[in-house]
């Protein structure tokens, strides 16, 4: 079997459902003709180098697959007939493609992609935790000074405060006694 790559430019004005119909038809041809779909890569809307059918933008899709020449002929016939496809180009990547090696490469790439996604997710979670800690630190009312605990700022019952209170009480008592004597 041979390995091919087909790049198609689809009309950018199509809705997602219409575009999915074109891609579904294309990908369903591959197993019918005895081929194997390796990857369907959506590149999205891009500006064209020159106008094609009075369009300045196009929706690019890359299809990587293995198959025989009859599969390529059928896909290109479909692209020529369908007006939704602006342009297409098929390139032979390998004359003798080993499907088992390709499947291994796909599984390795898939596991690497999953590991990368898990790593990114862990990094995002770590960033969220750090941001939450920063917000919590920013909302503290009294910032702690180095070597000073929160309890240092709380007044305790010391002898000075008791003395002041005692003197005030005696003064009040004395003033009350003086007022009584004068009467």
Image (cartoon, helix red, strand yellow):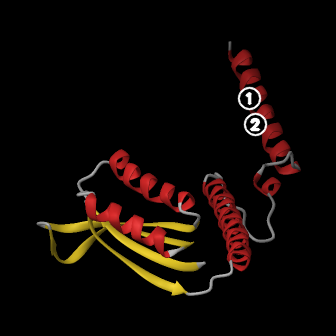
Q: What crowding class fits label 2: few (fewer than 14 Cα within 10 Å), some (14-19), or many (20 or more)?
A: few
Reading the image, the residue beneath label 1 is 172
Q: Quadrant of the N terminus?
A: bottom right
Reading the image, the residue beneath label 2 is 168
Percent x, y for residue 157?
A: 86, 45
Q: Is 60 or 169 nearer to us in this picture?
A: 60
Q: Is 131 or 36 nearer to us in this picture?
A: 36
Q: Is 131 or 103 nearer to us in this picture?
A: 103
Q: Quadrant of residue 48?
A: bottom left
Q: Quadrant of the C terminus?
A: top right
> Is 39 situated left or right of 108 in this image?
left
At 62% from the left and 86% from the top, the residue drawn is 96
At 73% from the left and 22% from the top, the residue drawn is 176
Percent x, y for residue 21?
A: 39, 49
Residue closest to the far top: 183
**Total numbered circles:** 2
Are the residues flagged by discs 2 and 1 in contact, CB closer than 8 Å? yes
Q: Evaluate whether residue 39 shows in this view.
A: yes
Q: Is 146 or 16 nearer to us in this picture?
A: 16
Q: Quadrant of residue 34?
A: bottom right
Q: What crowding class fits label 1: few (fewer than 14 Cα within 10 Å), some (14-19), or many (20 or more)?
A: few
At 72% from the left and 70% from the top, the residue drawn is 107
Helix, strand or loop status at disc 2:
helix
Tell me if residue 96 comes above or below residue 60 in the rendering.
below
> Is 139 situated left or right of 75 in this image?
right
Percent x, y for residue 136?
A: 66, 54
Helix, strand or loop status at disc 1:
helix
Q: Quadrant of residue 79?
A: bottom left
> Is 160 situated left or right of 178 in this image?
right
Residue closest to the far left: 54
Percent x, y for residue 33?
A: 53, 62
């Amino acid at each position: 079997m041979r390995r091919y790559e087909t790049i198609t430019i689809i009309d950018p004005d199509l809705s997602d459902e219409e575009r999915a119909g074109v891609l579904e038809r294309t990908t369903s041809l591959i197993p019918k003709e005895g081929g194997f779909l390796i990857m369907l890569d959506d590149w999205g809307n891009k500006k064209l180098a020159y106008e094609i059918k009075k369009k300045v933008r196009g929706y690019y899709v890359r299809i990587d697959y293995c198959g025989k020449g009859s599969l390529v002929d059928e896909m290109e016939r479909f692209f020529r007939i369908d007006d939704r496809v602006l342009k297409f180009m098929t390139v032979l990547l390998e004359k003798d493609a080993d499907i088992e090696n390709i499947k291994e490469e796909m599984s390795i790439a898939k596991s690497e992609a999953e590991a990368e996604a898990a790593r990114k997710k862990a990094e995002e979670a770590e960033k969220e935790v750090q941001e939450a800690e920063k917000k919590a630190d920013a909302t503290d009312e009294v910032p702690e000074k180095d070597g000073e605990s929160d309890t240092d700022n709380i007044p305790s019952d010391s002898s000075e405060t008791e003395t002041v209170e005692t003197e005030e009480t005696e003064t009040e008592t004395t003033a009350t006694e003086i007022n009584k004597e004068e009467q």
